[in-house]
Amino acid sequence: MQQRRLRAMALIMVAVVVLAALPLYFGIRAATRDPVFNSLDRLEVPGWAAQERTDAVSGSRWCLIDCRFRERTMTSERGTEETAQVYTAALTDAGWLPWDAELCPSQPVEGQYNCWTRDELTLDLWVRPPACSGDLLLQRPTVEPPSGESTDGESADSPPVTEAETCTGSVVSIKVRNAIGDDRMKPQPSTDPSLTGEDPDPVFTDDPLLDLEVEPS
């Protein structure tokens, strides 16, 4: 009888430790995780627009040597226009403000690219077609089964499925920087003559001395 009580008390102690350890673990994890990713987790976007999430981070959160750079990449089941609309609405609801930066993007890109600011952060949102939508991939011939055979239970008379039909959706990239480490927030170089010095003397294209003939001595 005494042994049963000891075992019961031991099981109760183990259960208490486990139940207390789980909240503590998730609390420490949330406290040590980058708060920017936590805020991105709270963006109100539908599930079809946030598939296959991948996070990457570099630099220091306190901008020691290099400021922190965060990037989140996801896939969406729908096209670029519809996906960009839901992310634009989610960022607006979360307090982000559109930012008309001069280098947003720094070079022409495919899809929809726009920039945002909030507090001490800047954010780049890029929604683009998937890699399989490239012209070279779409021009690849479709491999058909031999005559009379079928694949995956489909009839041999069924039309082949092309890559253009299977390549759908879009890719979403979100890049977040500390504003102090974003070069686009700094003053851009100016071409004001007062900063670069005096303009050089003009070059005369019609030099009268070119018409003079030099006579031999």
Image (spheres, grey):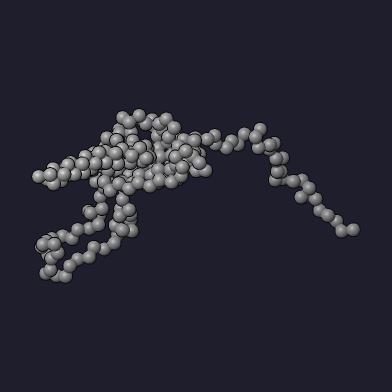
Judged left or right of residue 140, residue 122 is right
Residue at the image point whose x is 40% and y is 34% from the top = 116
Classify the position of the N terminus by image quarter: top left
Instruction: Give the vertical position of 175 relative to 90 (above or below).
Output: below
- The image shows a total of numbered marks equal to 0
Please tell me in which quadrant of the rendered image residue 87 appears: top left
Q: Is residue 182 visible?
A: no
Q: Is residue 215 visible?
A: yes
Check the image and name the residue furthest to the right. 217
Classify the position of the C terminus by image quarter: bottom right
Q: Position of residue 72 (x, y in %)?
A: 35, 44
Q: Position of residue 153 (x, y in %)?
A: 10, 62
Residue at the image point whose x is 33% and y is 58% from the top = 136
Q: Nearer the viewer, residue 125 or 138?
A: 125
Q: Position of residue 101 (x, y in %)?
A: 45, 35
Q: Nearer the viewer, residue 170 or 181?
A: 181
Q: Nearer the viewer, residue 175 or 130?
A: 175
Residue at the image point whose x is 17% and y is 67% from the top = 145
Check the image and name the residue furthest to the front. 2
Residue at the image point whose x is 27% and y is 41% from the top = 21
Please tell me in which quadrant of the rendered image residue 202 appears: top right
Q: Nearer the viewer, residue 74 or 153?
A: 74
